[in-house]
Image (cartoon, helix red, strand yellow):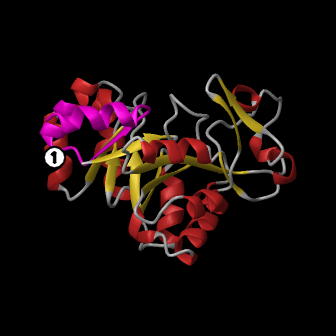
Amino acid sequence: MRILGHRGASLDAPENTLSAFELALAQGADGVELDVRLCGSGEVVVFHDATLERLAGRVGRVAETPWSTLRTLEVKTPHGTAAIPLLSEALEALPRTAWINVELKGDGSWFRLATRVARMLLEGGHQPHVVVSSFQPLCLVALAARAPQLRRGYLLEPDEPFWLESGVLAPLVGRDAVHPADSQLTLERLHRWHKRGREVAVWTVDDPARAQTLAGWGVDTLITNRPGVLRAALLQT
């Protein structure tokens, strides 16, 4: 079973930064989950929020801020500060042995984002160790049209009807994987998804006992803010 650092080792380092990704691997993660969106000048940046307030302490939207400005900002947390990276920088920094879950944040630019991420992954030869996920079905449709060989995982939205998310949209756009919230997962649902040929990546699992349970069930991937703690727990099973 894979352990992926959620935005890296995000409880111990500034989220979605190179330092958080490196720390996740050092703590025993098999790879990382990261979020990408387009900035104002069109580059694919690694950043979760649509706005800069929470992470960079500045007013403004990422989609309206050029990379020339973003590159001067830092993600500020109690665990320190670190620069906002481009997706290209993250892909270059992470080893090819690391599994990478690239989550697309659409915000209306889903087609351009999916197209640019697809081109970057294919040109860099990253398809063997990457899955692309999104809550936005249209992002995954655009990705499939541009690069059908890339793995696609559909993120289930807990606030939406489960029958719609899992029974209708997941089979259509999540060809390779389903990514439910931990609160949505049951053993019956896990078996059903596996029978349909989908891997199951569960988010966000931080409790060691729960991780041990899910490992026993046969979950494929755990996405966690605490990769070191979960790795230690799984080594005890």
Label 1: state its secondary structure: helix
For the residue pair 83 and 149, the one nearer the viewer reads as 83
Q: In x, y percent, where is residue 109?
A: 68, 53
Q: Is residue 193 above or below residue 233?
A: below
Q: Is residue 217 magenta?
A: yes
| Left or right of 48 in this view: 180 | left
Quarter of the figure with residue 231 = top left
Looking at the image, how many numbered discs can be counted on the residues?
A: 1
Quadrant where the C terminus sits is top left
Residue hosting label 1 = 192
- Amino acid type, mark 1: Arg
Query: Can see residue 185?
Result: no
| Left or right of 175 in this view: 133 | right
Q: Residue furthest front?
A: 26
Quarter of the figure with residue 210 = top left
Q: Is residue 118 above or below residue 98?
A: below
- What crowding class fits label 1: few (fewer than 14 Cα within 10 Å), some (14-19), or many (20 or more)? few
Identify the residue at horizontal 62%, vertical 55% (top origin): 110
Q: In x, y percent, where is residue 141?
A: 48, 61
| Magenta span | 212-237
Identify the residue at horizontal 27%, vertical 26% (top origin): 208
Q: In x, y percent, where is residue 186?
A: 19, 32
Q: Is residue 43 above or below residue 207?
A: below
For the residue pair 163 and 122, the one nearer the viewer reads as 122
Identify the residue at horizontal 36%, vertical 27% (top origin): 206
Identify the residue at horizontal 40%, vertical 31% (top origin): 226
Q: Is residue 63 magenta?
A: no
Q: Is residue 50 above or below residue 148?
A: above
Quarter of the figure with residue 213 = top left
